[in-house]
Image (spheres, grey):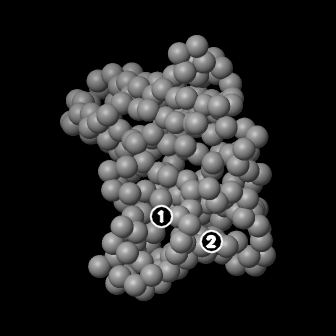
Amino acid sequence: GNSVTQMEGPVTLSEEAFLTINCTYTATGYPSLFWYVQYPGEGLQLLLKATKADDKGSNKGFEATYRKETTSFHLEKGSVQVSDSAVYFCALSVRGGSEKLVFGKGTKLTVNP
Amino acid sequence: NAGVMQNPRHLVRRRGQEARLRCSPMKGHSHVYWYRQLPEEGLKFMVYLQKENIIDESGMPKERFSAEFPKEGPSILRIQQVVRGDSAAYFCASSPRGIDEQYFGPGTRLTVT
């Protein structure tokens, strides 16, 4: 089946620290990969995506590269800000099916000033 | 262009009552997905609908839950005879073609007392 495993949280960093949140997946087909962010009390916002191997998604200083050989899509940011504090979800969808998203459990990030 | 709208944002029901959750997709979007987020967990797919059709309901509990997306009006997720275990955040997402990224609403937080 399709599944996503992401790094357990919570993660606490100081402002300007480097961030990595690991994400690996298993998929029966050729998935598209996503990172969503959820701020407290809000819905999910798409942060970035990649639809094929070696693609790099990027947005707001965050990056993730679709690695087919390691079935990974790790999220990175070089210098986090307090405003990046949120829960981050890795997700996949498999084309040719219903395009439903399969999510990891989420990683809560807290950035301290 | 207004985003995905969900109402109510918060809903309290006693055990045995019915809960109706509404989702209005973004303008021009005819594909709707419902997800459930239990406390401290990621989102789980429930059902995928297009106008007047249920495309994939593989994530829906077999009893008490139903969903519709009529030709006119919002999509409705209906939970009959709610139990405490139904307490969760229910998110709706829409997309224009079913193969594009999904845009999420703010969610309805259901509490069953």
**Furthest residue toward top:** A69
Q: Is residue A18 above or below residue B113?
A: above
State how many labels appear: 2
Amino acid type at image mark 2: Ala
Chain of the residue on which disc 1 is drawn: B
Does dot 2 land on a helix, a strand or a loop? strand
Q: Residue at x 73, y 50 (%)?
A: B98
Work out whether residue B103 or residue B66 is closer to the camera in this orientation and state it: B66
Q: Quadrant of residue A54?
A: top right
Taking A71 as reference, is A42 left or right? Answer: left
Which residue does the numbered mark 2 point to in the structure image?
A: B67
Q: Residue at x 48, y 26 (%)?
A: A24
Q: Residue at x 21, y 37 (%)?
A: A112
Work out whether residue B93 or residue B88 is closer to the camera in this orientation and state it: B88
Amino acid type at image mark 1: Tyr
Chain of the residue on which disc 2 is drawn: B
Instruction: Please determine if labels 2 and 1 lie on a single subunit.
Output: yes
Which residue does the numbered mark 1 point to in the structure image?
A: B90
Q: Residue at x 64, y 60 (%)?
A: B57
